[in-house]
Amino acid sequence: MKLEGLRVLDLSLFLPGPWLTQMMADHGAEVIKIEPPGGEPVRSVGYRQGDATTWFRNTHRGKQSLVLNLKDAADLALFLDLSDGADVVVEAFRPGVAERLGIGPDVLRARNPRLVYARIAAFGQTGPEVARPAHDLAIEAMAGVVSLNLAADGTPVNPHMPVADMAGSMLALSAVLMALYRRHGTGRGETIDISMQDATMSWLPNVVGPVFAENRAPVIAHERSFGGYAFYSVYRTADDRHIALGGVEHKFPTALLTALGRPELIPAACGPPGPGQAPVKEFLAGVFRSRTLAEWEVELAAIDVCWAPVLNLHEAWHHPQTAAREMLLRDANGNLHIGNPVKFAEEPARPDLHVPALDEHGPAIRARMGRADRR
């Protein structure tokens, strides 16, 4: 596998760091999860299936669990020794915490110059907001993303994807792999500073037009990506299901409106987003309400139009496409796992579906490092 032979020490909690290191574990890295004495918090957060929460199972499979109290001198010494032989350290503390514990990048990289030290924080390591405590929702709010998610009455609502967590995690993974690649040439590691706010804002090139080009906030209902186009909107069907039209290239409105007998609406549908799309939206809303989702599945199959049924989460995870892509895995005990989305032809991921018990690997790691087990 691509990352075989790499050793990763994961100090992070919750979602951004653990998802990153699980992706590495799925592709062959040895990942040692350093858990605080009380354990990773998501061991007890949310729904359970079998002997673990679904959140913990889907961010920690295939890792080794080692409990360390980094305020304890002996445990700190063990961590420092482990870092001497590590390739990557991932932490997601508030800025300054790692330095106070004596495990900041300057300390670890002085001992191990080849180390790639990845830091993930809400607002990064610099700037006026570094001390602000924040999880995903607050970070999305500061990044302007919550303002894009509006209820019918125009008030902001919770985004239903952990965009800040996942954007930060994905960019941290990319940065770690870039640093490891560069290390082949230089022999030196790197210190990576990932701000989840930065990462979230970097995902917005298709929606910053009003801000950059016209120096204003977007009018959400009129913007291309948020319902301003008739052919980039969601419509109700006769059975109270929904259809999403998701492509505004001119060929799609032309094909559908011609098939539905309203070619005179094509110029408006192919025009700019905003109020000019209203007659097209009104027509489509009426016509889609005239048939069930199943009937539209048959009707639209013969038309070159970019659309999809709006599936609930259970339907999405049990869809044939999901199965074909091996994105839903089942372990020997029947517990479900999210598959690995990175598909290599020659060295595919081989997820280890074992979920570690708290400090399961502590005795073996301590023995390997010449320490008496104190647990």
Image (tube, rainbow, N blue to C red):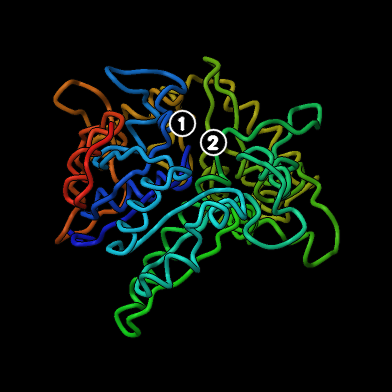
* Residue ID at (17%, 45%): 367
- Residue at x-position 22% and y-position 42%: 372
Residue at x-position 23% and y-position 33%: 360
Where residue 339 appears, as percent x and y from the top left, is 28, 40
**Residue 196, image x, y percentages:** 59, 52
Identify residue type, mark 1. Answer: Pro
Q: Nearer the viewer, residue 304 or 20?
A: 20
Report the side of 339 relative to 207 (left or right): left
Query: Label 2 belongs to which residue?
Result: 244
Secondary structure of the residue carrying numbered label 2: strand
Residue in the picture at 55% in, 39% down: 162
Q: Are marks 2 and 1 in contact (CB under 8 Å)?
A: yes
318 up-or-down from 212: above or below:
above
State which quadrant residue 195 falls in.
Answer: bottom right
Neighbourhood count class around disc 1 (C-alpha, 10 Å): few under 14, some 14–19, many 20 upward: some
Q: Quadrant of the N terminus?
A: bottom left
Please state if 283 lies on the left or on the right of 93 as rendered: right
- Can you say which quadrant of the picture contains the C terminus? top left
Side of 221 where 342 appears, left or right: left
Q: Secondary structure at mark 1?
A: strand
Which label's residue is closer to the chain start, 2 or 1? Answer: 2
The residue that label 1 is drawn on is 309
Residue positioned most to the top: 239
What amino acid is found at the position of numbered circle 2 in the picture? Ala
Give the CA separation, mark 2 to mark 1: 6 Å
Q: How many circles with numbers are drawn on the protein?
A: 2
The foreground one among 17 and 259 is 17
Expressed as whole percent of the image width and height from the top left, the position of residue 241 reads 52, 20
